[in-house]
Amino acid sequence: MDANLADIMVSSCYKWLLGVHGAAVFYVNRERAGDFYPPFLGWNSPSEHGGWEAPTQFELKKSAHCFQPGNANFLGIYILDNALDHLLNIGIESISDHALSLSGQFFEHLKTLKVELMTPEVEVDRAGNVCFIVEDMVQVLAALEARNVLIWGAYAGFGRLRISTHLYNDSRDVEICLDALNASIPSRRGI
């Protein structure tokens, strides 16, 4: 996403960005957001302060650094920096095309099974995720796990499952998952 189109942009760094938990991207567009201030402060928020004699007198940093109250997660930042270099070298459009191709294979196959698809069919409305609902989610997840296939399930929800694809997946991963799904979810063809 082009950050210039947003007033504020926040993103986790795990999963799609290949980073780790505990690091995030945070961007504030000063031209669009105006005087947006952090909800809490720490020792790292001000550029100047009154010291021990006037601790409540301070000037906030003029950058997004004012939103960072303490020490940065340097290990998470180094991992993210390396991951972003890797992603940019491959090319965001290439990664997107690859993930959409794989998720499209899942989408088309899931239409033949007894599931309710939640993901839009039109490619421009999709990402690398395909979400669907099954009646017996716990059983389906257990059957998939028994075949060493792990997908996400909303245990507190209503049977929603999600298959996510990214640059580290390939057509063999799709085949393995589809075989496991076929064994775990009945086909509509038999109705």
Image (cartoon, rainbow, N blue to C red):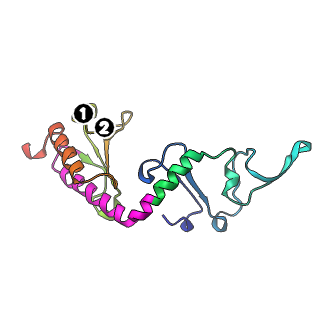
Spatial distance from mark 2 to mark 1, Cα to Cα? Answer: 7 Å
**Residue drawn at point x = 18 percent, y = 49 percent:** 175
Q: Which residues, given as a range, are shown in magenta?
A: 86-115
| Amino acid type of the residue tagged 2 in the rendering | Gly
In the displayed structure image, the side of residue 124 where residue 63 appears, left or right: right
Where does label 1 land, which residue?
136
Return the residue found at the far left: 190
Disc number for residue 18: none
| Marks 2 and 1 in Cβ contact (< 8 Å) | yes
- Residue 108 higher or lower than 93, as above or below: above
In the displayed structure image, the side of residue 90 where residue 139 appears, left or right: left
Where does label 2 land, which residue?
159
**Residue drawn at point x = 42 percent, y = 64 percent:** 89
Q: Nearer the viewer, residue 140 or 24?
A: 24
Q: Look at the image and say whether residue 97 sits in the magenta stretch.
A: yes
User: Quadrant where the C terminus lies?
Assistant: top left
Dividing the picture into quadrants, the one containing residue 149 is top left
